[in-house]
Structures are given as C-alpha cells and as structure tokens.
Image (cartoon, rainbow, N blue to C red):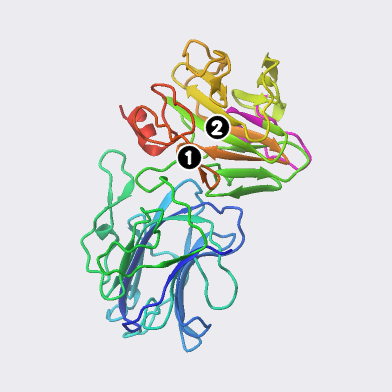
Amino acid sequence: MATYLTRTPSAGSHGTTWTISFWFKNTCAVETQEQYLYMGGDGGTSNNMWIRLQGTSRQLYLRNRSGGSNNTVLTTNRALRDTNAWYHIVYAFDGTNATEGDRVRLYINGERQTSFSSETYPSQGTGFYIGANGDPMNIGRRNDGSGYNDVKVLFAHYHIIDGTAYNADTFGETDSTTGIWKPKLSPSVNYGTNGCFLKFENSAAMGTDSSGQTNNFTVNGTITQTIDTPTNNFNVMNSLVNIPNATFANGNTKITDGDNAHKSFYGGFAVSKGKYYWEAKAVGGTKYTIGLNNVKNSFNYQQVSNTNNIVGDASTSYLDGDAIGWYYSTLYKNGSQIATSLATIVTNDIMQCAIDLDAGKIYFGRNGTWRVANSTTFDAAQNDTTFTTGEFYVPTFSIEGASWETNFGNGYFGTTAVSSAQNPSDGIGIFEYTVPSGFKALCTKSINSQEYS
C-alpha cells in the first residue's frame, strides 16, 4: 500500500503567491524512481504542480503546468545525494513579481539556488497549482494517474503558506556553535486560507495541522514516527557504498542482502572520539556479522556479487586499518580469531555493540548479556578486543541472504518500536536494553557534545 498524506481544500483558488518549506532526509540513493515530495492539482495531467527528486541524478525538479503546457520548470544542477543528511527546501512563489527570475525562488539549506540545468519562469500573474477548491494537495504522492506513489524519504516540519512568499531565513538559521543550518521551531508566518504546518509529532495523528488553520491532512497507509529529525540527526546505513544486490528500507535502518555470498554494510556517521552504543536485530536468515570498521575500508574495496566480504574475517574488509566482527560463533579482528565458542547469532537475536573510541575498546552483547562479563551488568574492564585510536570508524554489518534491523537510538527495529525503551544517561535515544553508563546514541547531539566539549 502506498503511504502519503493528502488534503482537498474546500475554499480558495489557484493563487499567485505561496511558500512551501520542508525538511527531508533522502534515503534512496539506489532508487531509480522519482521521489514526489509534493504535488497539487486537479488529479489529471493538464493542471498541476509538483516537486520531486529525480531518479538516479538526485536533482531537485519543479514543474507547474496549466492547460497541458508547462509554464514553470526548474531543475537544479546540484544533486542531493547524501543519504545521512537532512535537507531544508524552501520554494517561494510570487507570480506577481516584476522580475522574472524572482517569481520562483529556491533555497537549499538556507542558500538560494541560481544554477539550473533547466530554467523556465512563468509570465507575470501566473497562478500555481498548490492548493485550491476541489484540487488535492499531496505530500509523498504523485496523483495524476501515473502510479508513482511511494517515496523513500523522511519528512519534518512541513509548512505550506498561502498568500506570502517567504525567504529561507524565515524557517531556518545557522547554529552559532556548529555552523550547521537548523530549523526555527516556531517561525512567525501568516499561513493563509490553505496553509498548514505539519510537525509529525503525534504518532496517532501524523496529518494534524499545527498552524491554527485546522487544515489537517489524511494519512494513507502507515507512517512511522521517528526521533531522527533535523535538530538531531541519527546514524543510518550508508546506501552510497556500492553493495551488489543490496536493499535498504525503513529510512536506511533495515539492510538486506540478496546475494549468495556475504556483503558488508556500513554506517553513515564516522566517529573518532567518544563513547557510543547501538543495537541490531537479526532477521530472516542464518548468516550474520556485527562489528566495527575503519571508515576507509567502506570505499577502498568495491564489493562484487558472489564474493564474500565479512567484516574482520575477509581480507577485503581490513585493507586499511582495523576491522572487527562477531561472525557465527567466532570473533574476528583483521583476519585473526580473537575468541571462539561464542553463542551463534540466530534470527531474532538483538545484538549490542558499545565502543570507547578514546580507549580503543569494543564490547559486544547478545539479548541483554555482555559477552565477556557474561552478565547483564556492563563492566568497562571486560572488553572483547581493542582497536587503534585516532582513526575514524563506522558501525559495520555483514549478511548473506538475510537482514539486519538496526537501532542507533531512534527506537525501532524496522517499523516495530522497542519494547522496553531504555535511554542513555544523557537521555538522548531509545534502546531495547540498558545502555552502559557514559555511552551515547550515534546522533549529532551526542557527537557534538563529545566533539565540542
């Protein structure tokens, strides 16, 4: 079933002045199908407006169409390929503007875009098919009968403004410490008749409008809420790494190998200092490995079909720096067996990993029990093995014909919420098992607290 949000206004007309502002996390690097981030119009092919992320190019594309002809087309030269980043998009529409190039303004992360591979602006006085009486407004859906419905992105802070064209700094600002563009949580705007503000903060009512206009959207399908947001970005698996026959799902938190040989999957955040904890659930197979790898290994070896790449075991997994993995009942580091006769990882096991980058120590747990300590109580003196400090490392998983559902603190295995909801000592992140004291979720707030302390 396709998942999207939709609303059909009962008042208003095709206006000349609008703003659409939203944040999205692109988790579809290996997806060739266009991702429809917004579409409004009459449901046919003659009168509509859409914003989409192009297929393999990942360029942002806008089209406004009236009477079967395009009057506005903007395609960025810039490609939005980062699958572990939140992007802030603002389109300011002002069909009344006397300057042609100012009738549609596009901002990405606060920066106005001026480089386009296709660039057509409307004539003065043109209306935009964003929201009008009887015409559906759609988020995450193409509704002109062509059948492209599913989008593989995360959304946050979705504003639609009817009657005013705002700049990007109305909705975002630069963080004074990190220099990163971040959202203004309560921007001062006039939403207008068909405007709305979707915060997605209530899992039971994801289409609820927080603008005060009560322009609620209807949810089709099931939308999974996550605490992965522009104000705190959580690690997900990196779909930009070339992995043959791989599938990424649930915002790149679920990884699946469809090959008959082991493949390795790598996290998107590389860290070199601090303490971090994560979990992963083994799903639908028998051959699982969980571990850690020097980030340089994620790109130094291009994996090929029918060739094993097992983190810590296969020589191709430790070309540059340390690679460590719990594979079946053996713990490997750079091709050597560190420990044997471990419990074999089986389907539905929830595996735990804690890393102390400052001390160069890694700890593994299984279903709540730490391996070396053989206890549910964590003991910092009983680590599994060591690794070289001062290098950048990423979480790494290997599988053959199976899946991992990872949880770096967003509180889900796939689309199922953790049952016990344990938090790190800083309160950021949600996990199944007790998090060792001082260890944190792999997310930007926790990284910044250790990098900038």
Which residue lies at the image location 55% right of the left edge and 67% below the top edge? 149
Amino acid type assigned to the residue bearing label 2 in the image: Pro
Q: Is residue 62 visible?
A: no
**Element on which disc 2 rests:** strand
Work out whether residue 429 or residue 299 is closer to the camera in this orientation and state it.
Answer: 429
Residue 191 % position (x, y) = 26, 69
- Left or right placement of residue 64 versus residue 173 in this view: right
Give the amino acid at mark 1: Asn
The reply, left or right, for residue 26 in relation to residue 247 is left
Q: Position of residue 66 (x, y in %)?
A: 45, 86
Up/down of 308 relative to 171, above or below: above
Residue 145 x %, y %: 57, 78
Residue 303: in magenta span: yes
Q: Are marks 2 and 1 in contact (CB under 8 Å)?
A: yes
Q: Earlier in the sequence, mark 2 or mark 1?
A: 1
- In space, the residues marked 2 and 1 are separated at their CA atoms by 9 Å
The residue that mark 2 highlights is 395
User: Is 225 included in the stretch rendered in magenta?
Assistant: no
As rendered, which of 387 and 410 lies closer to the eye?
A: 410
Q: Residues within 10 Å of mark 2 (few under 14, many from 20)?
A: many
Q: Residue at coordinates 58% horizontally, 69% vertically from top-left? A: 148
Q: Which mark is residue 235?
A: 1
Q: Is residue 277 above or below residue 70?
A: above
x and y, in percent, of residue 353 in the image: 53, 26
The residue sitting at the bottom extreme is 67
Magenta range: 289-312
Q: Specify the quadrant that holds the C terminus.
A: top left
Residue in view at x 59 percent, y 75 percent: 146
Q: Is residue 297 above or below residue 147?
A: above
